[in-house]
Image (cartoon, rainbow, N blue to C red):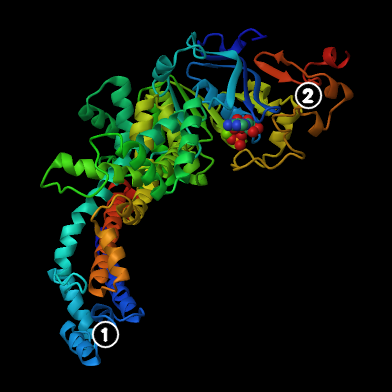
């Protein structure tokens, strides 16, 4: 119980820190959004009135408190470029990014976990060696290139897939899948390669430990040895690495959304940075960070579910 | 075996019989470690046999071979036979071997701190064995697990059964290990240095417990140890191992009163006092030769104060020198003039 309370405290502190950093970074950054909006022709009075309108002339701490309140109430101000509420823009884009990231994560777990267990069980036998070499290859592929290859060879040839744009889930589930599977695959493939090796090593490490010898000495069948005892123990290091994945997958979506022309957060982020659309950038960064921090929190909680040494400390 | 069954044990039945066991490990393409190299011994019903020897002499490999828990590769059982009640274990299919492990033979290991699965409860780890081997329901297995914990002297067993290994002390964990090893009433209990990692006071408690369990469950014990004090206190018969071979075998009294192999003598000399337990054997001068480069002749010759030229050229055989007393040495002190005059 103490463990969970400590983690919650840690979560709150991390988010608070991140919010301060995100907020102050955009105060320091060069470039004036108001000038960008009005163009080079604008005169000083125009600029000044717009600053007042946007609240940019108020003291920093007031702006910060306002902004924090906004994060909780969903009012993050207006985007300078799109002249509409940041929250509306985010809500439009968020489902796209979350779908791609979630699907990629699902694909990674779906393949890396069973393959890793399989390879560990046949350590150094032919199938293990083949798998390990193939995944070595997978690790070396950059995802934008992989994305283009996938578009060329799968996207263009298989009718089911669309390689441009996005169809919302609410419109058609099949349509959404047809636009999301390939981007998710593009993110997932290099990740599968890395995570597969990690799962394999984690399981092999466990196999060397004393407690496994004890279980074998009890005469229990291999299925109990591997899937009950070894797997649960190996899940502790595996979980760590799958916690780290989420950050990587989110970063991966930013690139892949460009390649597949998906209207997600990543695309929005890139365009809004070049436009110095600060309210929008701040909102995006804040939400991405909260997501990642929250997932790490969930991972921490899962640790305590698996490992009594953490839970009962 | 070369000699007939030991006279003093004639009335007893043989439980385990190991013959010419050779277990090698491939170190690399050229080197082979002959960890166990032609071991013969037997254990009778109800008997406690101690297996002693310095680190690296092949004690653990011998005991793990009986359980068929040698990792292969790099290990391989090159030759030999291991019979439990006339059942040849080395040719048993893996599935039947699982019925032997944890059921007919129970095993306790040296490291109580790491020998239990940290993420499952004590109860779970006892119960799974009961359920698998005896087909008990979860509920009656739990009852029996609590019973077992009581038998091995764990006071608040109803609470401990739902606890985790990290909540117990080393001695308590070793008691749990004994409960697990005994859970299916095995005929043979193999204990590989069960007390080495424990405090001295806890050591004797655990040893007493094992002997009591042996009587309660009417089983035999193969006790591996470094500690001659433990041997004197617990064993009926002693096997002294060196360089992957048995170099001397005798009833415990005979061995202490009348040791014949220079290695055994050295071992006994390093023991300060019979009542005093030593954690590690104080060293005999020189080192055990590594298992991949044993010398041509006697493997102990380089460290032996009595070594003759013959010892370095011809490897001695394990020979009977009196009833139930066997020695692998060219200089058998008890053999009398017959051998020495040769
Ligand atoms: N998995 C392995 N791979 C290679 N060599 C091994 C392996 N296991 C054991 N050996 C070798 O076999 C020999 C005997 O080892 P064993 O563990 O049986 O010794 P021991 O008598 O039990 O020693 P200790 O008292 O230290 O436990 C050692 O020389 C060791 O190098
Ligand atoms: Mg050992």
Q: Secondary structure at mark 2?
A: loop
Q: Nearer the viewer, mark 1 or mark 2?
A: 1
- Residue at x-position 81% and y-position 32%: B302
Residue on which disc 2 sits: B298
Q: CA distance from mark 1 to mark 2?
A: 101 Å
**Foreground pick, B8 / A202:** A202
Q: How many marks?
A: 2
Residue located beneath label 1 in the image: A41
Residue drawn at x 35%, y 23% is B184
Is the C terminus of chain B in the top left, top right, bottom left or bottom right quadrant? top right
Task: Please state the chain letter of the residue tagged with numbered disc 2 in the rendered image.
Answer: B
- Between B95 and A185, the one nearer to me in the picture: A185
Quarter of the N terminus of chain B within the rendering: top right
Q: Quadrant of ligand 2?
A: top right
Locate residue B38: give its quadrant: top right
Q: Residue at x 51, y 26 (%)?
A: A125
Q: Is residue A10 visible?
A: no
The x and y percentages for residue A105 are 30, 46
Label 2 Cα crowd, 10 Å radius (few <14 / some 14-19 / many 20+):
many
Label 1, residues with CA under 10 Å away: few <14, some 14-19, many ≥20: few
Q: Position of residue A302 (x, y in %)?
A: 28, 50
Q: Position of residue B298 (x, y in %)?
A: 78, 24
> Of helix, strand and loop, which one carries label 1?
loop
**B40 vs A141, nearest the viewer:** A141
């Amino acid at each position: 119980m103490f463990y969970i309370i400590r983690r919650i405290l840690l979560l709150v502190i991390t988010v608070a820190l991140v919010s301060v950093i995100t907020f102050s970074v955009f105060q320091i950054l060069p470039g004036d959004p108001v000038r960008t909006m009005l163009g080079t022709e604008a005169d000083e009075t125009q600029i000044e009135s717009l600053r007042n309108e946007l609240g940019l002339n108020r003291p920093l701490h007031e702006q910060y408190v306002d902004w924090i309140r906004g994060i909780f109430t969903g009012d993050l101000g207006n985007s300078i470029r799109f002249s509409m509420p940041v929250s509306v823009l985010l809500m439009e884009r968020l489902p796209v990014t979350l779908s791609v990231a979630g699907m990629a994560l699902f694909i990674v777990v779906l393949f890396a976990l069973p393959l890793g267990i399989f390879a560990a069980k046949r350590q150094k036998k032919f199938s293990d060696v083949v798998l390990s070499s193939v995944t070595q290859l997978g690790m070396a592929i950059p995802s934008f290139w992989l994305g283009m290859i996938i578009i060329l060879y799968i996207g263009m040839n298989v009718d089911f897939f669309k390689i441009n744009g996005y169809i919302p889930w609410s419109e058609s589930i099949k349509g959404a899948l047809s636009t999301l599977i390939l981007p998710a695959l593009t993110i997932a493939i290099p990740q599968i390669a890395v995570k597969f090796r990690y799962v394999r090593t984690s399981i092999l490490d466990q196999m060397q430990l004393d407690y496994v010898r004890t279980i074998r000495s009890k005469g229990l069948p291999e299925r109990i040895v591997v899937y009950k005892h070894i797997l649960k123990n190996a899940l502790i290091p595996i979980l760590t690495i799958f916690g780290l994945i989420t950050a990587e997958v989110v970063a991966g979506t930013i690139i892949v959304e460009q390649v597949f022309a998906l209207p997600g957060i990543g695309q929005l982020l890139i365009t809004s940075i070049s436009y110095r659309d600060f309210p929008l950038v701040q909102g995006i960064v804040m939400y991405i960070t909260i997501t990642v921090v929250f997932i790490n929190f969930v991972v921490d909680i899962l640790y305590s579910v698996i490992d009594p040494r953490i839970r009962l400390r | 075996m070369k000699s007939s069954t030991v006279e003093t044990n004639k009335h007893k039945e043989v439980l385990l019989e190991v013959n010419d066991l050779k277990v090698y490990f491939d170190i690399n393409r050229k080197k082979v470690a002959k960890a166990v190299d032609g071991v013969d011994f037997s254990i009778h019903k109800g008997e406690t046999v101690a297996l002693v020897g310095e680190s690296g002499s092949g004690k653990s490999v011998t005991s793990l071979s009986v359980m068929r828990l040698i990792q292969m590769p790099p290990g391989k059982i090159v030759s030999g036979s291991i019979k439990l009640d006339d059942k040849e274990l080395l040719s048993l299919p893996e599935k039947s071997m699982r019925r032997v492990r944890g059921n007919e033979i129970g095993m306790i290991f040296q490291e109580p701190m790491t020998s239990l699965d940290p993420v499952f409860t004590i109860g779970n780890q006892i119960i799974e064995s009961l359920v698998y081997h005896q087909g008990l329901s979860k509920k009656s297995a739990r009852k029996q697990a609590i019973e077992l914990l009581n038998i091995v002297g764990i006071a608040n067993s109803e609470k401990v059964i739902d606890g985790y290994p990290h909540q117990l002390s080393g001695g308590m964990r070793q008691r749990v290990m004994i409960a697990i090893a005994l859970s299916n009433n095995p005929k043979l209990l193999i204990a590989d240095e069960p007390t080495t990692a424990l405090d001295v006071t806890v050591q004797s408690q655990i040893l007493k417990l094992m002997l009591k369990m042996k009587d309660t469950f009417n089983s035999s014990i193969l006790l591996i140890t470094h500690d001659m004090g433990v041997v004197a206190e617990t064993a009926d018969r002693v096997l002294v191992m060196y360089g992957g071979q048995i170099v001397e075998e005798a009833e415990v009294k005979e061995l202490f009163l009348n040791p014949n192999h220079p290695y055994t003598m050295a071992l006994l000399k390093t023991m300060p006092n019979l009542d005093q337990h030593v954690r590690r054997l104080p060293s005999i001068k020189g080192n055990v030769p590594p298992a991949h480069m044993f010398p041509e002749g006697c493997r102990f010759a380089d460290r032996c104060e009595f070594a003759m030229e013959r010892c370095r050229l011809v490897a001695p055989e394990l020979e009977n020198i009196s009833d139930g007393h066997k020695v692998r040495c060219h200089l058998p002190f008890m053999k009398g003039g017959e051998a020495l005059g040769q």
